[in-house]
Amino acid sequence: MILYQLQCDSEHQFEAWFKDSQTYDKQAKRKLLTCPVCGSTQVSKALMAPRINKSKNLSPSIAGDSAPSTGVNVSPQNEELRKKLKELRAEIEQNCDYVGNQFAEEARKIHYGEADAKNIYGEASLEDAKELLDEGVDFTPIPWLPKENS
């Protein structure tokens, strides 16, 4: 896993985790990266300093000995962004049906008229997201803070 500091064309900065640098490159090329502040898909890497762990007393999850997790890390300076992401999550959870990892399948059914049109949310793999884009299925990737951090 690699953490990148990203910046949109409006100079909003945010962090995101990627499996590796190639994953970032592929997502950026396909315009799958969006600014959590303004929604711009004109996202690039920002200058960043490397993070070096100096303590040997780190817990396994911090030291990287456990399974990696993905997400957006919102710094304390961006409380407004955290607030907006929390409001967005609440709005989506209140007004959309959660379909879990069946998101791609359900989105296709709606797109092709095989299911009634409704607002849905859930998870999709990068491969599924690419396929949905190729098929012209309208969806928006959203940075999703875990509930305990939102």
Image: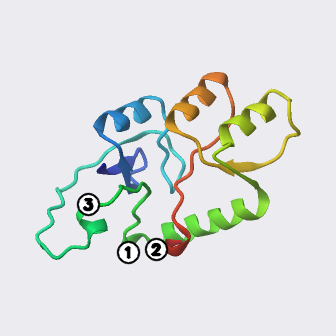
Q: CA distance from mark 2 to mark 3?
A: 30 Å
Please state which amino acid type lies under the numbered disc 2. Glu
Which residue does the numbered mark 3 point to in the structure image? 65
What residue occupies the far top of the structure in this picture? 134
Front position in the image: 119 or 13:
119
Q: CA distance from mark 1 to mark 3?
A: 26 Å
Which residue does the numbered mark 2 point to in the structure image? 79
What residue occupies the far right of the structure in this picture? 116
Which of the two labelled residues, at mark 2 and mark 3, occupies the earlier sequence position? 3
Mark 2 residue element: helix
Q: Residue at x 51, y 57 (%)?
A: 37
Q: Position of residue 113 (x, y in %)?
A: 86, 29
Can you tell which of label 2 and label 3 is closer to the viewer?
A: 3
Q: Are marks 1 and 2 in contact (CB under 8 Å)?
A: yes
Please state which amino acid type lies under the numbered disc 3. Asp
Q: Which mark is residue 76?
A: 1
